[in-house]
Amino acid sequence: MRKIFCVLFVLTCAVWGVNAQEHGRGFADTVDLTHLEPAWTSIGMEPRGTYLDWRLNGGVNYMSPIENQGTTGTCWCFAATHQLESMIKIDQYPPMFSDDFSEDAIHDCMDPMPGGGGNFWMSGGYFSSAGPVLESCQGWSPSIVNCMVCAQQNYRMRKLITIDNSTASIKTALANGPVLTSMDSTGGTAQDFDAYDGTFVLTNGSPSGTDHAVLIVGYHEGTADPGYLAGDYWICKNSWGTGWGASGYFYIAYGAANIGSNCAQVVEWGDAPVSPLRSLIFEDQNGCDGQFSVGSYNTAYIIQRLVPDRNGEIESIQWANIGNNFSYEIRIYRNFSGSSPSNLVYTFNHPSAEPYGGYLTHDLTSSVSVTSGTPIYVAIKLNNPTGTNFPIDLTGPYSGYAYISLSSISSGYQNMSSVGLGRDFSVRAMIYNPNALVPASGPIALVIMLAAFGAFFIWRRK
Ligand SMILES: [Ca+2]
Ligand SMILES: [Ca+2]
Ligand SMILES: [Ca+2]
């Protein structure tokens, strides 16, 4: 039976490059999340009270200093970096975590559209593969694209969750820490957003889509509390310097300017660098930066071919799922005919509903060894109960690496290229080899080796 494949590429950047206005934006709406179901409200964690503010929560400021993206389209780099910094501060305090991560590293090493746009899927692609690096290694250079070789830090991302756009869900996620979101900053508010001075709550204008990534860092409801304006609104962090808004922050009514679209939160990261003991193998070079649909199917089976760069063991499988409340299954095969995999070496079945989609990590429950240069085939049942979009990446190599079946996880596969969908899936494998220490030379290698020897590898779970 011939299937009808239809690809949804929405990789159009609302604001490309230098903005004609004073301030840059740069949010690229490439993956549709409007179908997400409220997954948070059932767990009863929604914060109570008239306000929550991570700038001053229990007398502690968990925010890193305001930075300025200038006129570049890199809002997404700043929002994502500041979200991760705050999550680590909240998790570790006391003492207060004070590292300043590099936005420029995401921009210059990751950005498929240099100076253009991106989103949390792309910043997540960077945080999950390279991991954050320090501002002191790669400072902000808006016009220069120059990916530096920096020492890997801890905090490589393991899990990023998507959050539906209901006020209750966002408030509940806020109980954990700041929430990434996007808004329409050009006409979305009734007042001039570029000229905002922080003395009032922005209200709804005539929003159309979203063009700017920002961070929701708190909320306020009802009559004025000491230090807070009256009203029901989000407290948000911008990346336009401290001279804009309320010392870099703004207040915006719930739902105004489409704020609450594209919400996400990094909730889990590793406590040690990947290299040199570990290597993350992937073909989705920019993370999940696109989506596809296959008719009205909300379940698809995919195989991604991955080639280990070392001998070792597969420690985890990491992948993206766009929907939420989904079931999944992971299999690892050693052989593949082009239509059917064989030599099954690992199966994990998760039949119940996983509440949070996004970028996920599954730690293997039994050992699977791999050989450098010998491909493995990772099969995943992707499920999106409330939608039909699935994650892909838009950067090579594509052909012969990604396969799709609509009938079974073990048969009926077609090459994505042969069906006109020449894209890789967002599927990775972490390879571990305790003997994989590379010869050290120079201070960076020394730092990496000392960190690897000294760190006891504990995954943070939250
Ligand atoms: Ca920074
Ligand atoms: Ca740069
Ligand atoms: Ca690719």
Image (tube, rainbow, N blue to C red):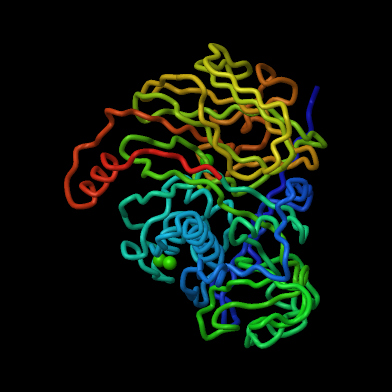
Which residue is situated farthest in the top direction here? 343
Instruction: Please state the horizontal and vertical placement of residue 452, each as a whole percent of the image.
Output: 29, 41
Q: In the image, what residue occupies the spot 68% across and 57% down?
A: 262
Instruction: Please state the horizontal and vertical placement of residue 462, each as a whole percent of the image.
Output: 56, 45
Instruction: Please state the horizontal and vertical placement of residue 124, each as a whole percent of the image.
Output: 53, 51
Instruction: Please state the horizontal and vertical placement of residue 369, each as a whole percent of the image.
Output: 41, 19
Q: In the image, what residue occupies the spot 54% across and 61% down?
A: 83
Number of numbered callouts drawn: 0
168 vs 245: above or below? above
Foreground of the two, 138 or 201: 201
Q: Is residue 194 visible?
A: yes
Foreground of the two, 349 or 223: 223
Location of the N terminus (image quadrant): top right
Query: Dividing the image into four equal quarters, which quarter contains ligand 2?
Result: bottom left
Q: Is residue 101 visible?
A: no
Foreground of the two, 191 or 89: 89
Foreground of the two, 73 or 121: 121
